[in-house]
Structures are given as C-alpha cells and as structure tokens.
Amino acid sequence: MPHIRPIAICVFRHHGKILVFEGHDPRKDETFYRPLGGGIEFGERSADTIRRELREELGAEVCDLVYLGTLENIFTYDGEPGHEIVQVYDGALTESGLYEQAVILGHEADVEKPFQAMWKSLDEFGPGKSILYPDGLLEMLSG
C-alpha cells in the first residue's frame, strides 16, 4: 500500500557548492542529484536522522545543524509513485578533509554498489541544467 515517507536531508555548503549524490531513474533515463540523508525512523528526531545517515553512508560526523524548512515531494521513480515529506537542514561536516574531496564514496545499507557524493555548484541546477531533487529545494536555497 502506498504511504508517505518522512525523510531528512542536509545541504552541506562549501564555496557556493552543496554535497549531493548522483542518482539515475532507469525508466526515464534521467540523471538527478539529491543531498544526502534518508528515512526518519519511528521515535527519531529528523536532526538525529541526518547524524545517523551520514555516519552510516560516509562514516562522517556532522555538526551545526540548522533547520531550513519542509518540502513536500510527490514524484515517480522507476515507474513507481512516491510521496515524501522532506525536512531540510544545513550543516557542517566535522572532518574538514571531506570538503576538499571532489568525489566521496558512500555506502547505502541495503544496496551493494557504492554511490558517489560530489560537490556541485547551485549554478549547475535549474531549467535546462542538472536536476536537483526534491522539487523546491533549489528555490529554497536560492531565496
């Protein structure tokens, strides 16, 4: 049965860039980018989700989390409808060396293949450019 999924993501900013992972929708043959984060577990505060997810995915610790707002994301991925309530944060990575890496390899708990996180400029996103999800995030960060 379809359900609404609560998630938390964090935009780590560095010299006009944000940390995102590259995803691909095989059905649409579409490459897209999204900040790191994940599903909020029952009884877990969304800020704690950011800390847990970054620890699990990158082995990284975060600090200075600031809540930016909430987005509602209704989408289709690989032909399946999805609906998320997205808690958006800004924050900092405690390991400064991560800011200097062009590509950071990450691991998703339930996926064998590692993913790549990278720093991309906000100027790289928008109509006719790279796609940033969730919808409304670019406007939130540009406003």
Image (spheres, grey):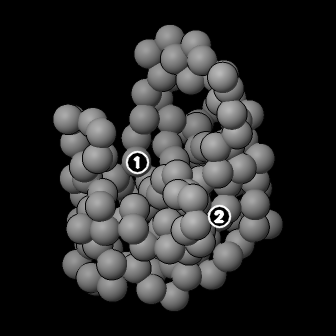
The spot of residue 14 in percent (x, y) is: 45, 74
Callout 1: few (<14), some (14-19), or many (20+) C-alpha neighbours within 10 Å? Answer: many
* Amino acid of disc 1: Phe
Residue 130 in the image, given as x and y percentages of width and height? 54, 38
Q: Secondary structure at mark 1?
A: strand
Q: Is residue 128 placed above or below 38 in the rendered structure?
A: above
Instruction: Look at label 2 and name its amino acid.
Output: Val
73 on left or right of 15: right
**Does residue 135 appear in the picture of this structure?**
no
Residue positioned most to the front: 43
- Disc 2 target residue: 88
Q: In terms of image quadrants, where is residue 114? A: top left
Q: Is residue 19 left or right of residue 97?
A: right
- The label on residue 46 is none
Name the residue: 33% across, 52% down: 117
Q: Which residue is depicted at the point 50% across and 11% down?
A: 27
Q: Is residue 70 above or below residue 110?
A: below
Tell me the tag on residue 21: 1
